[in-house]
Image: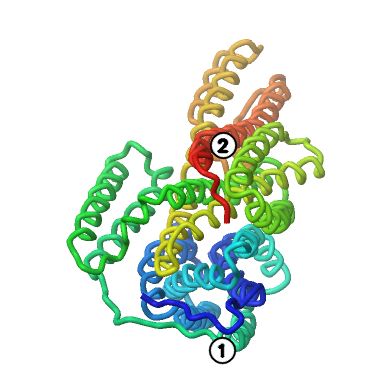
Amino acid sequence: MAELSENSSGYGGMKQVFTISLALFIIFLDGSIVNIALPSIIKEYSTDLGMASWIINAYVITVAVFLVFMGKIGDMLGRAKFYNIGLVMFMLSSFFCALSTNVEMLILFRFFQGISGAIVIPTSMGLVRTAVPPEKVGSAMGVWGAVGGLAIAIGPALGGVITEVSDWRWMFYINLPVITIALFLNKRIFQHLREKTQPLHFDVWGTITLSVTLFVLIYTVTKGPDVGWMSWPIIGGFTFSILGVGVFYWIEHKISYPLVDFELFTNKLYVVGLISNLLGGILLAGMMMILPILLTEAMEFTSLQAAYFITPLSAAMLITAPVTGRLIDRFGFFVPMIIGYIISVIGFYLLTSLELNTPTLSILWRIGVIGVGIAMIAVTSLTVSTVSVQSSQSSVASGIFAMVRNVGGAIGVSLFVSVIMTSFNHFSMVSIQDSIQQIHSTSLSTYEKSKLTDALKAQQVSFFDRNYTSHLESLEISKNNLGEWKKMISDLRDQEQKNKVTAIHYAFIFGMLLSIFFSISAMFLLKKSFRL
């Protein structure tokens, strides 16, 4: 394994932390900035949403699949050297993403971006940890977590601005000067850093097994809301994933140089950090999906307006993360962790009171509260998992940590989408049944009642269709009853908008329940006085 030989001062200091965080911001940013530009990309390449979604998935899934493997290579080859290699690869793949002439080419280079991200993320965590003395690790990881959280949260807003004033390709062009500056700064801060390396030992079968298993798991989770959680393809995907984990565990105990040291999972601190990290990934990805849907589809804001509304989430995470790091340095892990869970529960509860006519300021501060809670959970779990392992294992441990977060993100989006769509479909059916009952109590003729009832029963309600009553308005109704029918259509349209908000309320309740359930893990931090 590679071991750090510190410079004469002992540590690189916060200068090293901030320099590493500069490049890390771009890596995390590319996981969310493209989302809001998908409509423009779809239009330019004349493709469909199913194909375009792989512009997102190719990056996120590749990062998750290769994180552990790249973390292991970083431990062997040397974190600083491998970190710079990852940055160069990311810069080149960003350039070719911007030059893509078709959607297939863009997806291909997003895949290479994902590999680069899988190199940078775990190695950067190791380099941040060794940049400061143990009593300041919490603050350093707070900065690391703040940068990552800010990049993920600010992505849609920045993407909206770039798409509005320029061209989506600049989302990739802006990576080039930032990475160039980071590489120049790295040369200065790493010049006294010496790393001892050992011969590389590749766990080929373990890497293949873990990669395939993770890909199938994430793909299965992302397809669950579309094809149904109880469908055979989904059941088969989960079954394959469980068997894959078993095979991977067997392989890792049979070889001399395993990809993952399972002794890591005997470390309760590390496991608690992973559990809370999983929740952090679920909640952040879920909120980044829920809020744009709430603001654009229910409250009918524009995409750019919705992007600005998410800014409080970014600001809250930016401010809270370093503060959380200081709390960890002073009080240990339990206090900031449990406070984060409590604030998350309160935040989700406050969001359940949002309505169609909620004032702007009221929306903004509620979003800010949930940002504080998620940031405290994320930074504390990151610090717990980082400081609780030996330095020689830090890159692998960091790779597992980041992999869990990415998997949590994929799971979060799918679970929250499933809750929203299931709730919305249920309430829409109830609304249609109420309208049918209302028809029978009107003065409409028997023929008109039958025709309108059949039309309502055949009504296909879509969450993302704002004109779902258009075909009802085109039905021929006698002039005497036309006003009454239009009133019913208007009421149905208004009720469907309310149904969207109610469905999203159920997603917020789901997030609140998840926070309560996961908070049980924080109790394990009480057994001893864990301090940095």
Mark 2 crowd level (few <14, some 14–19, many ≥20, 10 Å Cα): many
Quarter containing the N terminus: bottom left
* Number of the front mark, 1 or 2: 1
Colouring scheme applied when the structure was drawn = rainbow
* First in sequence: mark 1 vs mark 2: 1
Identify the amino acid type marked 1.
Answer: Gln
x then y, percent, for residue 392: 40, 69
**Which residue was labeled with disc 2?**
507
Which residue is found at the position 68% from the left and 46% from the top? Answer: 295
Callout 1: SS: loop
Which residue is found at the position 80% from the left and 44% from the top? Answer: 360
Callout 2: SS: helix
x then y, percent, for residue 357: 78, 35
Q: Is residue 466 above or below residue 86?
A: above
Q: Is residue 381 above or below residue 473?
A: below
Mark 1 crowd level (few <14, some 14–19, many ≥20, 10 Å Cα): few
Distance of label 1 from label 2 (alpha carbons): 49 Å
x then y, percent, for residue 307: 69, 56
Q: Which mark is residue 191?
A: 1
Q: In this view of the protein, which residue sits in the foreground, 3 or 228?
A: 3
Q: Is residue 147 visible?
A: no
Q: In this view of the protein, which residue sits in the foreground, 62 or 101?
A: 62
Q: In this view of the protein, which residue sits in the foreground, 73 or 288?
A: 73
Give the image quarter of residue 136.
bottom right
- Asked whether, in this view, residue 215 is left or right of residue 190, the answer is left
Quarter containing the C terminus: bottom right
x then y, percent, for residue 57: 45, 61
Q: Is residue 66 above or below residue 432?
A: below
Give the image quarter of residue 263.
bottom left
Which residue is found at the position 78% from the left and 37% from the top? Answer: 358
